[in-house]
Image: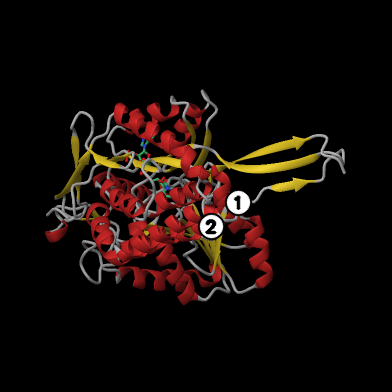
Amino acid sequence: MAVSTGQEEQLLIGGRWVGAEDGKRFDVTNPATGDVVGSIPNGSAGDVQAAIAAAAAALDDWKAMPAIARARILRRSADLMRERKDEIAAVMTAEQGKPLAEAAGEVEYAASFMEWFGGEAERVYGQVVPPLNPANRALVLRQPVGVVAAITPWNFPAAMMTRKLGPAMAAGCTSVVKPASATPLTAALMLRAIEDAGAPPGVVNLVTSRSAGMVAETIFSDRRVRKISFTGSTEVGKDLIRRSADQVKRLSLELGGHAPYLIFDDADLEEATAGLIASKFRNAGQTCVCANRVYVQKGIYKEFVDLLGQKVAKLVVGPGDRPGVNVGPLIDSRGVDKADEHVQDALSRGARLVTGGSRLTDGEFARGSFYAPTVLEDVTPEMLISYEETFGPVAGITKFGSEEEALRLANDSIYGLCAYFHTRDYARLLRVAEKLEYGIIGVNTGIISAASVPFGGVKESGYGREGGSDGIDEYLDTKYVLVAGVGI
Ligand code: NAP
């Protein structure tokens, strides 16, 4: 069944909603049912160039607009996103699959970036530095980088976009957005809210396309684009690093993760199981900050595994638009194949199944991409699940003895996005937080995201930070101005 989005989604170029230049479109499907829920233009290289041209044409006026006026547009965008929350959430659930309550929560979270960076727009301060020669003046200016291209993933189709557009708009940059081809309808609704809030034509532009490589090629070869902000897989991120070399383009990369989740003997078991479930099974395990390796200390190991198994077995799986569903479908059948590959590989190498462990294919599950929420124990480092991102509802548990062993296991990863641990020992809390080689640490909680804090990774999880006061720096250039002969 098609979802209602109020009007036919189009590309947004220079303030006009238009079709692709060659008229081509592609279908968007519901991962819970396989049904087509809508269609969207399949943008070409010409459309991408037109969007870049519109962003370039809008740049001078936008950066010259008083910061307070830009801030008002950002805040109004947030208000409109909240007013339209139910409508946007319904579309998101239809094309992405997550439960409606999670989709509505994501719209709130997405709006919070517009609101928070509305405030930051007014706080882009430079510096006056004591000069070498007191007769001179040394100034440091912070200026918008220019035209930005934002490439976003399907797992958070609203929030990953505003996490880029909020600071870009606040800094005075104009943007071209290329959303994931699985979730373009949510992107179009979010951009409509920004446009309706009064963003002048060309400040934000939307190009949907099924040819991501072509879009990247067009963006990276165009000198008007000064910065690319990408959220997605490490594999594609590495490709973008290579592409950026030709014109030395600025990049922010929010890439994959493989979060360790440590539970020490002194943890509160109720809190630890609740935190792990929130981290692992939200969005059916399809988040970059999902727990991917669970390490439990030997003193509470059995009790923890039993309690977790009982709780996970009670999670309700089904289409995201049904009340009471905790875990929706995976984005597509490849997502299911990957989760199952990780489970079968672990079982074949000696892991034990605590609950779940299979595709769901009977009855109402037959047409969708469903996988049973799964817990495995006795997981070892050579199993796929211990080093590859699962991106599915599978928790693999390993027993550890000492704090040193837990840290060694936790840091043994090419990724460095997010790590979690549960303890009530304040000294361990500080020690472990300092020693974990990750950009984000959750202590005694499985949920860490907010617009006001810096989000980003180390190692192969990327570079740059989104959110927080660091977030706007990604969209500002620093300029040093020396004025000689001013006098004392
Ligand atoms: P993806 O395959 O890398 O796709 C992300 C975006 O890049 C999509 O818009 C995609 O377009 C586009 N893309 C694909 N191939 C491209 C290419 N060769 N050149 C330029 N763009 C290209 O990732 P995904 O499967 O959508 O998202 C899941 C990944 O994102 C996971 O690894 C997850 O950990 C990561 N993630 C990271 C964060 C973070 O903050 N660190 C947040 C969320 C997700 P199409 O959709 O048209 O292919």
**Residue labelled with disc 1:** 124
Against 233, is 297 above or below? below
Query: Mark 1 or mark 2, which has the lower sequence index?
Result: 1
The kind of secondary structure element at disc 1 is loop
- Residue 405 horizontal/vertical position (percent): 61, 57
The kind of secondary structure element at disc 2 is strand
Query: Marks 1 and 2: which is nearer the front?
Result: 1
Q: Quadrant of residue 85?
A: bottom left
138, 461: nearer the viewer: 138
- Residue 355 horizontal/vertical position (percent): 32, 64
Can you see residue 435? Answer: yes
- Assess mark 1: CB under 8 A from ligand 1? no
Q: Residue at x 30, y 51 (%)?
A: 192
446, 384: nearer the viewer: 446
Can you see residue 455? Answer: no
- Residue 375 horizontal/vertical position (percent): 37, 61
Q: Quadrant of residue 329?
A: bottom left
Q: CA distance from mark 1 to mark 2?
A: 31 Å
**Disc sitting over residue 278 in the figure:** none
Amino acid carrying label 1: it is Val
Quadrant of the image for the N terminus? bottom left
Q: Quadrant of ligand 1?
A: top left
Within-10-Å neighbours for mark 2: few <14, some 14–19, many 20+: many
Against 40, is 283 above or below? below
In the image, taking residue 213 as reference, residue 481 lies left or right, namely: right
Q: Residue at x 53, y 47 (%)?
A: 171
Q: How is the image coloured?
A: secondary structure
Against 119, is 235 above or below? above
**Residue labelled with disc 2:** 419
Q: Residue at x 21, y 42 (%)?
A: 40
Quadrant of the image for the C terminus? top right
Amino acid carrying label 2: it is Ala
